[in-house]
Amino acid sequence: MAEQPSALDRYCIKQLDASLTGAPAPVVPAKPAKPSRQAPPVVSFRRPAHDDGIEVREESLRTVDAQQMYKLRCECGRSWFELVCPTIVHCPACHKAGLVTTRPTR
């Protein structure tokens, strides 16, 4: 079964489709600064009518470090996180040794 895209992914896809087809982008309501009973103001991301090209701009890029984390769960029910995937671990709750097996990601 395929994983369903999140709301943010669906929004980004709509924005990308709108930018590629030239259609007006979807209107996104802004978040209110404080709770009120009035409807929040509507923010529109629409292109001007005279813009028929592609906007090109240059930016400096930064490097971003990613770190993978593994969630381990013992048969006793205790779970914890590790930065490396060990072969054998000792459960912090029941103190028994366990062989680590991995499942394929979805």
Image (cartoon, rainbow, N blue to C red):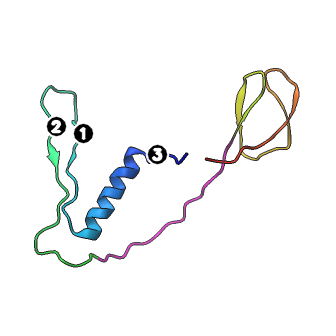
Is residue 58 located in the magenta-colored stretch of the structure?
yes
Q: Quick check: 57 above or below 85?
A: below
Q: Position of residue 98 (x, y in %)?
A: 86, 32
Quickly name the residue at label 2: 40
Question: Which circle's residue, 2 or 3, is located before the other in the chain?
Answer: 3
Residue displayed at 30% across by 63% down: 17
Q: Which residue is mark 1?
A: 31
Q: CA distance from mark 2 to mark 1?
A: 7 Å
Q: Is disc 1 in contact with disc 3, using a CB cutoff of under 8 Å? A: no
Instruction: Report the amino acid beneath label 3.
Output: Gln
Work out how far the residue at label 1 is from the one at label 3, CA to CA, in angstroms. Answer: 25 Å
Assign the magenta stretch its main secondary structure.
Answer: loop
N-term-proximal mark, 2 vs 1 = 1
Q: Residue at x 82, y 44 (%)?
A: 86
Question: Is 85 situated above or below 93?
Answer: below
Q: Is 28 in front, or is 60? A: 28
Callout 1, which amino acid?
Lys
Give the image location of residue 63, x and y in percent.
54, 65
Residue shown at 22% from the left, 54% from the top: 26
Mark 3, residue position? 4
- Helix, strand or loop status at disc 2: loop
Residue range of the region highlighted in magenta in the rendering:
56-70
User: Quick one: label 1 or label 3, which is nearer the N terminus?
Assistant: 3
Q: Nearer the viewer, mark 2 or mark 3?
A: 3
> In the shown orientation, is residue 11 left or right of residue 48?
right
Graded by Cα atoms within 10 Å as few (under 14), some (14 to 19) or many (20 or more), the crowding at tag 1 reads few
Task: Give SS at disc 1.
Answer: loop
Q: Identity of the amino acid at label 2?
A: Pro
